[in-house]
Amino acid sequence: MQAFWNAKFQTKSLIYGEAPNNFIKEHIELFVNAKTVICLGEGEGRNAIYLADKGLEVEALDISDVALLKLRRRAKESYVFIKTRHTLLEYWEPDTLYDAVVCTYLHLPKQNQKMLFEKSLQALKPNGYFIAELFSESQIHFSSGGPKDIALLYDLNDIFDTVKILPCKIVKLAQEVVVLNEGDKHVGRASVIRVILQKLVQD
Ligand SMILES: C[S@@+](CC[C@H](N)C(=O)[O-])C[C@H]1O[C@@H](n2cnc3c(N)ncnc32)[C@H](O)[C@@H]1O
């Protein structure tokens, strides 16, 4: 897994571009009262740097040490600090509570996809937000990027079945066709699933 991603990131250019993901940027209002955020599968750090620049305390988790090195270099150049966690999501045991969890295009095998939502909710403070953009199974019919293996893509109904029993309000859960312009790897019409969950305050 690490070798696969390191090979992709072993280039001077930013393979998913410099700008943050549009869906995250369009929902910056979710972060107005937030102080801390963790970005899962954050790669070269385009969302992390954007959020740190807005004054948030940001952590970035990723399995690629090459991507995390690029992220730290970029953070230094941008005069922000981002704490990095070099691990597989599967081994991450949320030990801190965050105001927000961000995830763009972390594509796990089917049997581990539930874990993404369960661990993210576990890592959130009450009222905190989970916001994610992921390729849907329909992305298999598009050539704008993402895994070419359906077992690594997400199904809207499976996500609904997972999140409906978690302690959260579903603010948004939708499959949409969008136009991506993210570096060399995500370019053109794409089928994505956009998710916003708010952690419920429990008694
Ligand atoms: C498609 S890239 C997206 C990177 C970043 N989120 C972005 O949108 O620019 C997927 C990222 O997830 C990381 N990744 C893949 N599987 C992972 C896993 N099981 N645990 C942690 N990171 C993983 C890869 O190293 C890579 O950085």
Image (cartoon, helix red, strand yellow):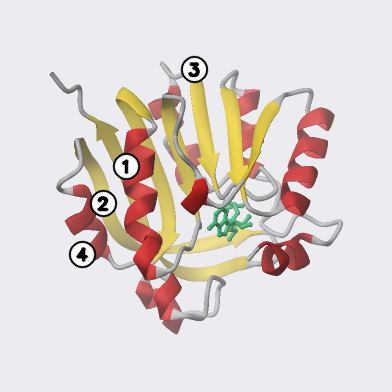
Label 3 – label 4 distance at C-alpha? 32 Å
> Crowding at label 4, few (<14), some or many (≥20) Cα neighbours within 10 Å?
few
Query: Please, what is the three-letter code of the amino acid marked with disc 2?
Result: Leu
The answer to whether mark 2 and mark 3 are in CB contact below 8 A is no
Ligand 1 picture quarter: bottom right
Q: Which element type, helix, strand or loop, lies under badge 2?
A: strand
Report the quarter where the C terminus lies: top left
* Residue 186: % across, % down: 59, 65
Query: Please, what is the three-letter code of the amino acid marked with disc 3?
Result: Lys
The answer to whether mark 3 and mark 4 are in CB contact below 8 A is no
Circle 1 is placed at which residue position?
A: 196
State the mark number for residue 173: 2
Circle 3 is placed at which residue position?
A: 35
The answer to whether mark 1 and mark 2 are in CB contact below 8 A is yes
Circle 4 is placed at which residue position?
A: 157
* Residue 11: % across, % down: 84, 61
Q: Earlier in the sequence, mark 3 or mark 4?
A: 3
